[in-house]
């Protein structure tokens, strides 16, 4: 017994918290990249996550393309759509106040949600767990669906890969330089607008990838992104706007805190993230990992 | 950032709601009526209410022959978004602009809020899709009729059957609002009266919860024999699906879905839903009359067969029209007058057969305990239930005068 709760229960919750944290980490990382490089608060991020899940479902039902290919194709498709959106719409408002980007992406999210509701209804569609990953592992203290374990595994790889690409590679250095001083980087012959559009495409592609992973877990429905996006924004704010490593660590951390709240005070699980956010903002206004 | 995200979202929500607030057309002369279907058109209860409820109201107009009898009936719809303030706002605006009957309203919190507005404006209100038995208890009034089902019926029928089958220790997963809490409390009373115990309970935030895994793991580690789901709609579907993923049923724990509709069974699929015990007061494949009603309705809702609450919208609208025809359209603008007339006349329709309305506003009909079929046993689309037991109307609902309804004289 730990704090009056059976230890196996707490281990179980820790594991579930890490699973939920995986999604927070993947989504907040994309948001942090986009905000860090484009200074756009992408409210359409949850919608992109939702579209990623629907594309996965569509690939299976219209083209008979299964989960494993969808892991590659769905982020690509959504990434291309993101590239077009950035070029056609978002790139026009970089010189305006930051609120315009927020409103534009919020509007785009509403449109995408509305269109999907119109075609699929609010309760959405279901997507089966891939055969290879169905089944349950008996861990002794709980039954663990194999697929959920896979999600954590995939999320850790995706997060590390992205962090590595941005912080440790030449391309990442170029991206970071372009945000610091676009005109200087452009004078070296780099096509900065394209670089920025590709960054946006990459960010929403990550959201779509999270959507693919979420499809077998939750019902694929037009509101699935809305359910997550508020929490994910809080994660980004707590981690420090624009800090990729911060977003990843905070994502996993908050997932775990939420998991434990579910045991000790279930009605509080919806607000605990925002309580943490308020406390962090009071103590460190620029977030845990943000630069002041 | 000067403007907060919350403020922007709030403004967007309010302007969005105002823009979609359904307007009432100007009243034509003669025998014209307006019926407003206030429901969940986009959230967790949209499959069990929503568009199919509207179709059921329209079916009632057709079956009764409203047009042939010289009535000009307009049907409106409004999405209460599971928010009591939005629902009460729609009701207030509708009643002020001449809506004669407000019907459906899944979600007990919204349903109870609208009962107050109906009383204040003296307009007829048939709640067919919220469960709280307070609608005919402390919150009852002369303008409100509670059709179809309530928490007392669900707790006693499904809960009682599970205890009788040997499920003595329970763990509840409860939607944390008026409906879930009441359903849990009433089921707890049934379990305890039969000598059972409740070993644990988690109240989860409604309606934003989609992942039930941590609650399910708690239920599992409690060692209870029965997992009581005091929730409904998409929440129930998600809970049961995830219970399978976590091996809950495989480990021998029984699931008591206290409120499951046929559309939920359809959403889960028989592979997962098979063997579930549930209670409804209407099943489309019950007898020739229910099948005939469903056959007429289906062209309007090709992808969704009616569940009990939706069938209640049909039955309620039909009975309302009959009552209005007796007292006349001008008198029917008083909700109390038309509801009094509805209570005087027995009801009869294809969906529920012959039933009646008690003085506290309770629609009295039998309830049926069903078991969900195995995949191999289902021969035609939506053929999902085996009937286990029928509870007569007078035993389905709480005895009159035990619920504290002010309309009932001691």
Image (spheres, coloured by chain):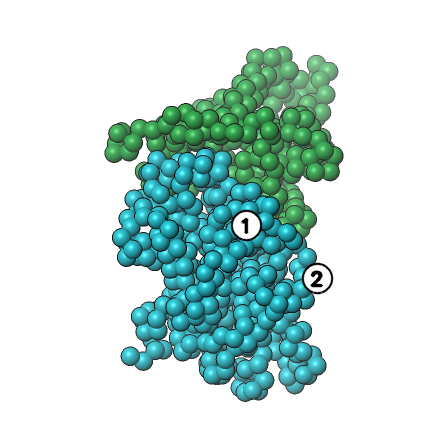
Q: Give the answer, above or below, for where A271 lies relative to B180.
A: above
Q: Is residue B96 visible?
A: no
The residue under the point 42% across, 76% down is: B358
Q: Nearer the viewer, mark 1 or mark 2?
A: 1
Find residue A141 and report its image quarter: top left
Q: According to the image, label 2 marks what residue?
A: B299
Label 2 neighbour load within 10 Å: few <14, some 14-19, many 20+: few
What chain does badge 1 belong to?
B
Q: Is residue B369 visible?
A: yes
Mark number displayed over residue B373: 1
Find residue A193 and report its image quarter: top right
Secondary structure found at label 2: helix
Task: Give the colour in which the image draws chain B.
Answer: cyan
If the image is split into quadrants, where does the C terminus of chain B sit?
Answer: bottom left
**Residue B117 percent location from the top left of the image:** 45, 70
What chain does badge 2 belong to?
B
Between B368 and B202, which is closer to the camera in this rendering? B368
- The chain letter corresponding to green is A
Task: For marks 1 and 2, give the CA distance.
Answer: 26 Å
Label 1 neighbour load within 10 Å: few <14, some 14-19, many 20+: some
The residue under the point 41% across, 25% down is: A139
The residue under the point 33% across, 38% down is: B223
**Residue A52 percent location from the top left of the image:** 64, 35
Taking the image as shown, residue A135 lies to the left or right of residue B141, namely right
Between A136 and A194, which is closer to the camera in this rendering? A136
């Amino acid at each position: 017994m730990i704090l009056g709760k059976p230890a196996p229960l707490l281990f179980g919750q820790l594991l579930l918290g890490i699973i939920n944290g995986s999604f927070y980490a993947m989504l907040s990382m994309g948001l942090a990249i986009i905000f860090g490089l484009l200074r756009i608060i992408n409210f359409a991020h949850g919608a992109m996550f939702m579209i990623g899940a629907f594309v996965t479902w569509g690939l299976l039902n219209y083209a008979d393309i299964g989960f494993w290919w969808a892991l590659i194709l769905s982020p690509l498709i959504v990434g291309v759509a993101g590239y077009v959106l950035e070029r056609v719409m978002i790139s026009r408002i970089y010189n305006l106040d930051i609120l315009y980007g927020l409103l534009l992406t919020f509007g785009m999210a509403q449109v995408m949600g509305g269109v999907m509701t119109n075609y699929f209804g609010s309760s959405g569609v279901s997507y089966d767990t891939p055969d290879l990953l169905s089944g349950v592992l008996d861990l002794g203290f709980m039954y663990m669906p194999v697929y959920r374990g896979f999600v954590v595994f995939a999320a850790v790889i995706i997060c590390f890969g992205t962090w590595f690409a941005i912080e440790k590679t030449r391309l990442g250095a170029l991206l970071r330089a372009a945000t610091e001083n676009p005109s200087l980087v452009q004078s070296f012959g780099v096509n900065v607008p394209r670089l920025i559009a590709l960054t946006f495409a990459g960010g929403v592609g990550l959201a779509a990838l999270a959507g693919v992973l979420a499809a077998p877990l939750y019902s694929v429905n037009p509101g699935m992104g809305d359910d997550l996006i508020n929490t994910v924004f809080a994660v980004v704010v707590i981690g420090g706007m624009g800090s990729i490593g911060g977003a990843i660590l905070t994502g996993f951390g908050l997932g775990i805190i939420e998991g434990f709240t579910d045991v000790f005070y279930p009605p509080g699980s919806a607000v605990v993230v925002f309580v943490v956010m308020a406390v962090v903002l009071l103590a460190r206004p620029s977030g845990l990992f943000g630069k002041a | 950032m000067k403007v907060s995200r919350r403020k922007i979202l709030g403004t967007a929500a309010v302007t969005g709601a105002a823009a979609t607030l359904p307007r009432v057309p100007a009243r034509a002369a003669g025998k014209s009526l307006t019926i407003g279907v206030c429901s969940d058109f986009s959230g967790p209860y949209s499959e069990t209410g929503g568009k199919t409820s509207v179709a059921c109201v329209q079916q009632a107009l057709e079956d009764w022959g409203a047009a042939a009898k010289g009535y000009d009936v307009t049907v409106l719809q409004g999405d209460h978004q599971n928010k009591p303030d939005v629902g009460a706002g729609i009701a207030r605006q509708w009643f002020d602009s001449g809506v004669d009957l407000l019907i459906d309203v899944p979600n007990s919190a919204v349903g109870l809020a609208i009962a107050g507005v109906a009383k204040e404006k003296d307009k007829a209100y048939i709640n067919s899709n919220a469960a709280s038995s307070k609608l005919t208890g402390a919150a009852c009034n002369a303008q409100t009729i509670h059709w179809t089902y309530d928490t007392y019926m669900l707790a006693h029928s499904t809960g009682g059957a599970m205890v009788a089958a040997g499920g003595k220790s329970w763990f509840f997963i409860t939607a944390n609002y008026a409906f879930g809490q009441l359903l849990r409390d009433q089921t707890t009373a049934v379990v305890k009266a039969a000598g059972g115990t409740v070993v644990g309970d988690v109240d989860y935030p409604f309606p934003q919860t989609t992942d039930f895994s941590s609650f399910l793991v708690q239920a599992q580690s409690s060692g209870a024999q029965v997992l009581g789901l005091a929730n409904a709609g998409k929440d129930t579907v998600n809970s049961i699906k995830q219970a399978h993923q976590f091996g809950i049923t495989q480990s021998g724990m029984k699931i008591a879905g206290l409120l499951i509709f046929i559309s939920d069974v359809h959403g889960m699929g028989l592979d997962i839903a098979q063997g579930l015990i549930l209670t409804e007061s209407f099943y489309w494949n019950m007898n020739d009359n229910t099948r005939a009603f469903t056959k007429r309705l289906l062209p309007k809702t090709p992808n969704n067969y009616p569940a009990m609450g939706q069938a209640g919208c049909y039955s309620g609208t039909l009975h309302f029209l009959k009552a209005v025809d007796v007292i006349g359209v001008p008198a029917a603008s008083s909700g109390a007058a038309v509801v009094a007339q509805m209570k005087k006349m027995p009801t009869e329709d294809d969906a529920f057969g012959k039933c009646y309305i008690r003085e506290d506003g309770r629609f009295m009909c039998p309830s049926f305990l069903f078991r969900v079929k195995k995949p191999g046993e289902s021969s035609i689309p939506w053929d999902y239930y085996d009937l286990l037991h029928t509870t007569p109307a007078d035993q389905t609902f709480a005895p009159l005068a035990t619920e504290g309804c002010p309309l009932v004289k001691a």
